[in-house]
Image (tube, helix red, strand yellow):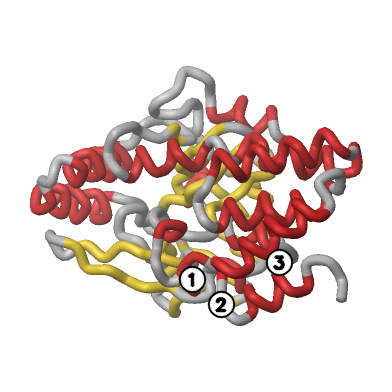
Amino acid sequence: MEPGADVRQSLKDGDLAKALEQAKTLVRKDPASAKPRILLFQLFAICGDWDRSLNQLAVAGDMTAETALMVGTYREALPCEPLRARIFAGRETPIVLGKPENWIALLIEALRLDGLGKTEEAAALRVKALDEAPATAGTIDGTPFSWIADGDQRLGPVLEAVVKDRYCWIPLHRIRSIDVEPPTDLRDLVWTAVTLTLANGGEIVALVPTRYPGSAESADPLLRLARRTDWVETPGGLYTGLGQRMLATDAGEHALMDVRRIDLAIDLAIGLDAGGPATAEDGGDAMAEDHHG
């Protein structure tokens, strides 16, 4: 049996705990091999054990140069996950690509209020934010829509993305197209690789978190493995997601890992106005230039 086959069978069965123990055994049996450590890095990431995931990734990177590109990509992505959790807990604010807009500021303030337990006030801000947010038409894998948003009401028409070593929010009306890489390995259950073409024509290679915040801590392995999406109603009437990210349009819902391409009919007068992040000094256009291809 190929090393790791039993791990993959356990994952197929939905037994994440067993898969993790089997992967640890593989590392103990062959500690000088990078392959079992790459497997373990991915499983730790699925479980939300970011520090141990990063450690296994770093050790694997020291063992062979063949993994340098992959190691570099995820070494930068892993530290963004604790920051992401703090942002959704209302303790920090995200970098936002483009000049500040009131509706995005309201979404961020709503997270802060949620963190303080002021759920009714947060819900009122989200209603106002989503009313103010521009609707963007387009197509998703060829199917037309009049508007698109994340299924999670904390985000609305905003895309979460990790660009190199920075976690950021990107308003959908600042994006011309999103090309989504098909899932090929376990790490794709945590981060989905995309290429974003911005309003100004610049391209960004980014990682979109495949799962909603808190999914890694769920007791349900199917949510942790991004095989399902659950919607949880919270005080204030807010619906938040667990498990795989869903994109909502007026034509239906789409699981992120099933999507291959989104084209957006953006208003260039608005979309090109991407002069700088709302919570950082370095500009949004610079972000695009730094990470072409």
Residue neighbourhood size for the residue with mark 1, other residues' Cα within 10 Å, grouped as few (<14), some (14–19), many (≥20): many
Q: Earlier in the sequence, mark 3 or mark 2?
A: 2
Q: Identify the amino acid type marked 3.
A: Pro
Q: Quadrant of residue 199?
A: top right
On the image, the x and y values in percent for residue 4 come to: 78, 67
Front position among marks 3 and 2: 2
The residue carrying mark 3 is: 182
State the mark number for residue 221: 1
Residue at 16 percent of width and 65 percent of height: 237
Q: What is the spatial separation of the Cα atoms under label 3 and label 2, in whole angstroms?
A: 21 Å
Residue at 46 percent of width and 29 percent of height: 277
Residue at 75 percent of width and 49 percent of height: 37
Disc tally is 3
Q: Identify the amino acid type marked 1.
A: Pro
Tag 2 secondary structure = loop
Tag 1 secondary structure = helix
On the image, the x and y values in percent for residue 222 come to: 49, 74
The residue carrying mark 2 is: 14
